Image (cartoon, rainbow, N blue to C red):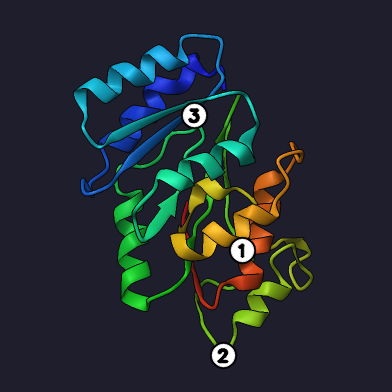
Amino acid sequence: YNTERYLSDCLDSVINQTIQDIEIICVNDGSTDNSAQIIEEYALNDNRIKVLHKENGGQTSSRRAGLELATGEYIGFVDSDDWIDSDMYEKMLSIAERYQVDMVSSGYYLEGNYTTKHLDTVEYGLYDADNIQDLRDNTIYCVQRKETGLRGSMCCKIFKRNILMDTIKMVPDSISIAEDKMAVITYMLYCNSAYVMPEA
């Protein structure tokens, strides 16, 4: 919403992924700046891009609307003020397919006056039927390390669409702070496997 300043960098990072067989769904959540025009211009030049314009309803409402249009097996989210490494989705999809997991999670870099690296603070690697409960127990807070467990951002994860379609309905549109953390926590209660990457 109203992020024209960052939007081109965001879209360039998505369309230039090393994995090209992706669909790119841009949801304009009622922006009043030039965001709508920017995504329409990108859509004219890339047939993978689908554009949805809607009334302003917030982050969860926008994610849900975009998800309704998605057809892929795995879903990733990129907020309009974010950018992603060119090989991010190729790496994540490779892990998801290799281990047949419902979610892949990584850390992220936070840019401002200086750049900081934020990783998940749980054990890295595969979580399946034998130990998925350990990850659930540490999703909100890792007691052993006295730190946040899984990073709340949805933008450094990929999710199985069929599970996410059900769990995102449980997150109220009215939540405007940490709504992505709520979505991740809810998803964790219903997924059966995950892989946590030791990189951002």
Which three-letter amino acid code belongs to the residue tagged 2? Asp
Mark found first going from the N terminus, 1 or 3: 3
Q: Which residue is mark 1?
A: 187
Q: Position of residue 193 (x, y in %)?
A: 51, 76
- In what element is the residue under mark 2? loop
Residue contact at pointers 2 and 1, CB within 8 angstroms: no
For residue 60, the mark is none
Q: Which residue is mark 3?
A: 80
Q: Position of residue 26 (x, y in %)?
A: 41, 32
Real-space Cα distance between discs 2 and 1?
Answer: 18 Å
Residue at figure coordinates x 31%, y 75% from the top left:
98
Characterize the local packing of mark 3: few (<14), some (14-19) or many (20 or more) Cα atoms within 10 angstroms.
Answer: many
Q: Position of residue 49 (x, y in %)?
A: 30, 33
- In what element is the residue under mark 3? loop
- In what element is the residue under mark 1? helix
Between 172 and 195, the one lying in front of the other is: 172
Q: Position of residue 22 (x, y in %)?
A: 27, 47
Real-space Cα distance between discs 1 and 3?
Answer: 22 Å
Q: Is residue 77 visible?
A: no
Which quadrant does the N terminus fall into?
top right
Which three-letter amino acid code belongs to the residue tagged 3? Ser
